Amino acid sequence: MSVHNGQRAKPGALRAGGLVATGMSDHTAAQHSRLALKSGSQLTLRQPYGQAVGLPYCPHLNSDRDKPCPYIKKTAIPPCPQGGMIIKKLPKEMNRIIILGSSSGMPDPERACSSVLIEAGDKSYLIDAGEGCASAILRHKINPVKIKQVFITHTHADHCIGIFMLVQMMHLLENKESIEIYLPEEAVFWFENMFDALYLFKEKLSCKFELKPITHDFLFKDENLSLRAHLNRHLLSNKEFISEENLPNKMESYSFDLDLGGERIFYSSDIADLQDIENLIEETDLLFCESTHVNIEKLLELVRRKKVRETILTHIHEEVEGKKEQIIKMAEEMGYRNLRFAFDGMSINLP
């Protein structure tokens, strides 16, 4: 497992669906990247001055090379260079996790709110969609068209409010793909109405989405990923007020247990305390644990005892931010050397 910030590609070099294409001028490449917002391939491209353009690439790379580029007749761009392009296979890409947002419930000028993106196979999955997730997707050169499923752990604003801008962005990109948005069952009705209140009418959007409930026995599984939801007690502090006011809230909040290519990953999201996860993280390969509502010293004792291979602290509050070095030193003194702090743009490669 490796963590990095990404590497610069050479100007004019494109990456698309396991292919590298070279021999294209920066001007032509930039034109193609702008045109490709509606396509589904991924590229890594550097324009002049080292500016990154991480947009999808012209779809002719994945089509019949004998056919002319479909954009030539529609746009005033230089001729498509596909005929003279050198194309070669890349090694199969590893699964990757990217931290889009790592702040606590308090907005942070250096961090977006909670959101984690998983890239596996030819798809991407989003866990939580806090404020700023759509902007973060573009900032970190991620192809939004690849996102097929979104999983919301609970409906505190710092974990879910970005879903509306995400759908709006997909619509403006004229994405024709469907997106499944999974969220606590109690919230489906309210979110349906909120989309309408924001004039994001399903019938008018180019991007089709469906809201689906997460229940106490929820399990999602496809060819790349399995995700199981575990109910936690994060919202139970509201119980008395909800009862007194006769409100419909059911206080549904979840942690997620994932299997990604044989790697076991646990995403705590917000929890009441460590009791919510202590019986769920035994021998986990990678634990993403929030740091706002837990005792950090007890967490370190727990992950060492439960043989968690690596722990990444996220949901970073200002108080925790100021104690990073102290916490790292404490972990090392306790014999746990695989502790990291999340940051926006952090990228973790998995086997």
Image: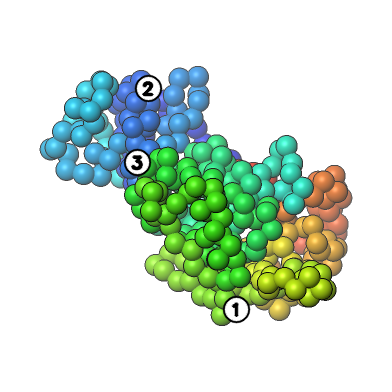
In this rendering, the answer to whether 35 lies above or below 227 is above
Q: Which secondary structure, mark 3?
A: helix
Q: Nearer the viewer, residue 302 or 102?
A: 102
Residue 116 on image: x %, y %: 58, 53
- Per the model, the C-alpha gap separating discs 3 and 1 is 37 Å
- Per the model, the C-alpha gap separating discs 2 and 3 is 20 Å
Q: Residues within 10 Å of mark 1 (few under 14, many from 20)?
A: some
Q: Which secondary structure, mark 1?
A: loop
Q: Which amino acid, mark 1?
A: His
CB contact under 8 Å: marks 3 and 1? no
- Per the model, the C-alpha gap separating discs 2 and 1 is 51 Å
Q: Position of 16 compared to 63: left or right?
A: right
Total marks shown come to: 3
Residue that appears at 78% across and 70% down: 245
Residue 175 on image: x %, y %: 37, 46
In this rendering, the answer to whether 55 lies above or below 130 is above
Q: Which amino acid, mark 3?
A: Lys
The residue tagged 3 is: 38
Q: Quadrant of residue 285?
A: bottom right
The residue tagged 1 is: 216
Q: Position of 233 compared to 229: left or right?
A: right
Residue that appears at 51% across and 75% down: 219
Residue 283 visible to an observer of this rendering: no
Q: Which amino acid, mark 2?
A: Asp
Lower sequence index among marks 2 and 3? 2
Q: Which of the two marks, 2 or 1, is nearer to us in this view?
A: 1
